[in-house]
Amino acid sequence: MWNYGDVIDVVAANVRADAPAFIHGDRVILWPQAYRRMNNLARALAARGARPGDKLAFYLRNCPEYSEASGASFLGRLVHVNVNYRYKPEEVRYILDNSDAQCLIYAREFRDCIAEIRHSLPKLVTYIEVADEPVADFAVPYESLVEDGDGASLGIKRAPDDLLFIYTGGTTGMPKGVMWPHGELCAIWLDRMKRTLGIAPQSLEDYGRLIAAAGAGNRSLPACPLMHGTGFITAITAMMGGGCVVTVDNHHFDPHEIWATVERYKVQGMAVVGDPFARPLLQALDEAPGRYDVSSLLNMSSSGAMWSMEVKRGLLRHMPQLTMTDSFASTEAMGMGSSVMTKDGETRTAAFQLLENAIVIDEHDRPLQAGSGKAGLVALGGPLPLGYYKDPEKTARTFRTIGNRRYSVPGDWARLEADGSITLLGRGSNCINTAGEKVYPEEVEEALKTHPGVEDALVIGVPDEKWGSAVTGVVKLAPGMIFDEDALRAHVRQHLAGYKTPKRIVLAEVALRAPNGKADYKSVSEYARRVLDIGS
């Protein structure tokens, strides 16, 4: 079992000196420079009191600093903690406090947010600002830390059980940190390498020879945020392969800018989050056929949202060379299934082949037989995370022992077909996946109910071409109050991130709850679709 920090040492020692590690706009950082900067940052954090196992939080958009500092955290045995850059101050404070973050790297644009909450974070002692100087008076400039030093290898002993955290919105309310040991993630990566290439190195020495023979790895562009699992793992995989993480210098998702970047830097791989990302990318190509040279792009992967056959077909019209891999995975269970589509073979939307360690179980944790016609929960055996940070109850619910083996059961329902494939049915919970973001309805409901005019509220997701699933509120007003949709949406936006704000809010003309007081999501969802004239 390997450690990401040890892999970076091996890659840096064997990759071609002119191979880029990070590209962002006009910035190109070659591997020797990147390795030097990573080591300098790891030493600087240690000099400021960070010790192995301490948490390093990232509050950044897609940029080289995110990947570079991730490498530094691996080299210095610190624990990566992702912070959603769309969060409002109270949400950011929750993540930093819940994770016990000791260090924080944040972008200049988020300075006011950090200034507002930092006095309530006694464990957070080191603030690093990515910005042109001068930085905030409570922070140190990122560039001074990565440039100060000789960049030599740290020469420390690392372990496969060193951790990194990936915080996910999950399905039980507030976000939770999924604790992944390096060794488990490396095992998944090496298994994927064996399945796709037919070989996998047995030792780091063998891997060094492979890197030296290749000279440089692929250039990969995460079109989705690095602060989410899909983007983060995509970036790590590129780095560990001696490749290059290409990011777009734009605060908003701009498909034309992405295609221009693919053309400019001959990008070979791209990560998206289903139709919410892939559909606008297709529309940009359709608007200007032949405008961009996209012949370099060989692989597009997706995880976290539905990726329809219609959109895949459209992308293949422009890029017949493309292999599209739709991964069925979650932060708690990476590698449950996959679906591959090329110009020579189509796959149904939501149809996946289960991978070797995955099974489908009934409500009593008994494995289902192929072709039973029954729906069950998908469970994944190892490699697995340790569980959720500081949440043993949720850990026990999700990570179960079935037949003397530990499984992760994140809550995805599927029908096991006769040929062993599955048809994904969705989450059994009411979690809403909107453009790759997980939104827990009760959090939005509580924000709605803090408005003085709202007596009760439920929040559901309705099908939406742009967002995949659109957050939608259904409210019961207090007596004498007048319904004002815009005012209610503005109220929620004051408390929660923009993507959690309902795209529409409708006035309830049905009961929101069953006689026993429990929320009647099914009836409310049907009602909202009728009101908004949206099909199933």
Image (cartoon, helix red, strand yellow):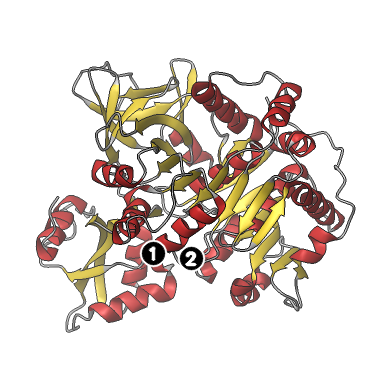
- Residue 414 percent coordinates (x, y): 28, 31
Label pair 2/1, CB-CB below 8 angstroms: yes
Secondary structure of the residue carrying numbered label 1 = helix
The residue under the point 18% across, 23% down is 373
The residue under the point 77% across, 37% down is 9
Q: Residue furthest right?
A: 150
- Residue 304 percent coordinates (x, y): 39, 45
The picture quadrant where one finds residue 132 is bottom right
- Residue 35 percent coordinates (x, y): 77, 47
**Visible residue check, residue 362:** no
Give the amino acid at mark 1: Tyr
- How far apart marks 2 and 1 lie (CA) works out to 8 Å
Does 284 appear above or below 15? below
Does 233 appear above or below 277? above
Q: Mark 1 points at which residue?
A: 499
- Residue 180 percent coordinates (x, y): 59, 37
**Visible residue check, residue 340:** yes
The residue under the point 20% across, 18% down is 372
The picture quadrant where one finds residue 17 is top right
The residue under the point 52% across, 59% down is 84
511 left or right, relative to 453:
left
Secondary structure of the residue carrying numbered label 2 = loop
- First in residue order: circle 2 vs circle 1: 2
Q: Name the residue under label 2.
A: 86
Q: Quadrant of the N terminus?
A: top right
Give the amino acid at mark 2: Arg
Depth order, front residue of 217/97: 217
